[in-house]
Image (cartoon, grey):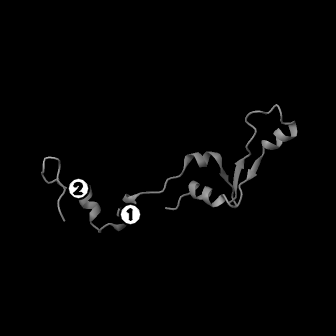
């Protein structure tokens, strides 16, 4: 294995962290250094999970252009709806990533 060199041609010294990560004395800690799944905050703000595991969402179409919509339609657009079964797995993964 060749050593990495800087732009002047000198060998770069390895950092203490790089040496520590290369060793397999701490495999659990090494795995945590590789990367973690993060919760998508925009998804958390748009959806809510019920106790039984269903996902709730707001209905679209109430924000503007309400002049041409009757009262009953606007009132029903204000209620929450259940997310479709086809979309639920992707949203659940974004809300609660597996660690």
The residue drawn where x is 76% and y is 38% is 62
The image quarter containing residue 90 is bottom right
The residue drawn where x is 63% and y is 61% is 89
In whole angstroms, how far apart are the C-alphas of marks 1 and 2? Answer: 18 Å
Measuring from the top left, give residue 86's x and y in whole percent. 68, 61
- Report the front residue among 2 and 72: 2
Measuring from the top left, give residue 5's x and y in whole percent. 17, 53
Quarter of the image that includes the N terminus: bottom left
What mark, if any, has residue 56 been given in the picture?
Answer: none
Measuring from the top left, give residue 50's x and y in whole percent. 69, 56
Q: Residue 18, relative to residue 7: is it above or below?
A: below
The image quarter containing residue 94 is bottom right
- Report the front residue among 85 and 54: 85
Dot 1: few (<14), some (14–19), or many (≥20) neighbours within 10 Å? few
List the residue tagged with mark 2.
16
List the residue tagged with mark 1.
31
**Left or right of 9: which side holds 33?**
right
Measuring from the top left, give residue 83's x and y in whole percent. 71, 55
Q: Residue 64, relative to residue 98: is it above or below?
A: above
- Report the front residue among 9 and 93: 9
Dot 2: few (<14), some (14–19), or many (≥20) neighbours within 10 Å? few
Identify the element where label 1 is drawn.
helix
**Left or right of 99: which side holds 56?**
right
In primary-sequence order, the first of circles 1 and 2 is 2
- Report the front residue among 95 and 65: 65
Q: Residue 2, relative to residue 72: is it above or below?
A: below
The residue drawn where x is 58% and y is 45% is 42
Identify the element where label 2 is drawn.
helix
């Amino acid at each position: 294995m060749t050593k990495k060199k800087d732009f002047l041609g000198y060998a770069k010294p390895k950092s203490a962290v790089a040496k520590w990560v290369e060793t397999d004395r701490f495999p659990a800690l090494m795995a945590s250094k590789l990367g973690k799944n993060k919760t998508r905050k925009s998804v958390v703000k748009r959806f809510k999970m019920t106790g039984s595991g269903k996902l709730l969402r707001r209905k679209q179409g109430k924000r503007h252009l309400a002049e041409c919509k009757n009262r009953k339609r606007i009132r029903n657009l204000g209620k929450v709806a259940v997310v479709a079964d086809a979309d639920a797995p992707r949203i659940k993964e974004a809300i609660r990533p597996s660690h």
